[in-house]
Image (cartoon, grey):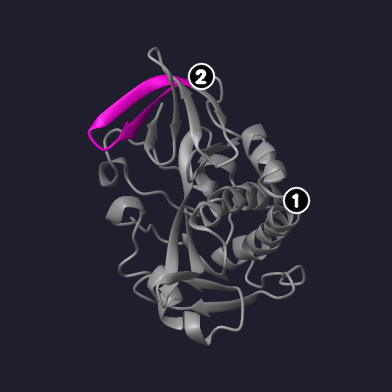
Amino acid sequence: MSTDPDWSGWPVGYDRLILAETDSTLNEAERRFDALPGPCWILAHRQTAGRARRGRAWVAPQGMLAATLVLPVEDSPDRVALRSFVAALALHDAFVGVTGRAEPFALKWPNDVLLNGGKVAGILLETIQRQGRVAGLSIGIGVNLQQAPAAAEVEASALPPVSLLSETGASVTPEDLLAALAPAFAAHEHSLQTYGFGPVRQAWLDRAARLGQQITARLGETSLTGRFDTVDEAGRLILAAPDRTHAIAAADIFF
């Protein structure tokens, strides 16, 4: 395991802050936002109150990566949400970089990265509001590096959690992964800003899990089952169900 991360590829214009402990890197991002001069990655070796989507607690096994990118933005809410695709692509690139393998990894809409069919990483986006408008975005990322949560600690219907070490044999520190993740994110963010969502969308689809196959989307109390056709130009999942085609902006997806 590396004890001296190689920061030589760190992207210009991005800061980093590494903490021994915090309640949540997402909370830390909100507290520090006004004092930050620009984008900043915040990594914590221990979180005491990490959280996941829909207010769920984030189970944090030892040695995981818990990080948040604080990103000043002036985009519309719809465009802000496209950063989940940018972050997923960056994670995919980082995993390939630290393991030397691409084939075990896939991207699950809207915010997970899979490894051999299990969940190895999750992404959570939260906007930062100032004076009634979106001023920034916090992109929270959790990765099971050395260990994965026990099956009993996650929802019964969720994909099984896996770790990078158990599935690939790669022993990677949080700093090692961050050193690969930050430049990958910066490159895909530059693509989004320069060329729009099209190239990011196509790259994401090229790595998508279950594209063209049957999936189930749970929207609150409603479930829809159909074929995962594509992701549209707004980032919505297009589901071809028996009754009609649905464009889904937010849902939990089950295989």
223 part of magenta stretch = yes
Provide residue 51's location: percent of width, then percent of height: 34, 60
Report the quarter where the C terminus lies.
Answer: top left
From where the camera sits, is residue 154 visible?
Answer: yes
Instruction: Please identify the dominant SS of the magenta region.
Output: strand
Report the quarter where the N terminus lies.
Answer: bottom right
Residue at (51% x, 19% y) in the render:
213
* Nearest to the observer: residue 25 or residue 30: 30
Tell me which amino acid carries mark 1.
Answer: Tyr
Lateral position of residue 178 relative to residue 31, left or right: right
- First to last magenta residue range: 213-227
What residue did someone put label 2 on?
213
Query: Relative to residue 96, is residue 228 depicted above or below?
Result: above
Provide residue 16's location: percent of width, then percent of height: 60, 76
- Contact between marks 2 and 1 (CB within 8 A): the answer is no
Residue at (73% x, 59% y) in the render:
190
Q: Quadrant of residue 72?
A: bottom right
Residue at (41% x, 49% y) in the render:
148
Q: Secondary structure at mark 2?
A: loop
Q: Residues within 10 Å of mark 1 (few under 14, many from 20)?
A: few
Q: Which mark is residue 234?
A: none
Q: Secondary structure at mark 1?
A: helix
Discs 2/1, front: 1
Q: Which mark is residue 195?
A: 1
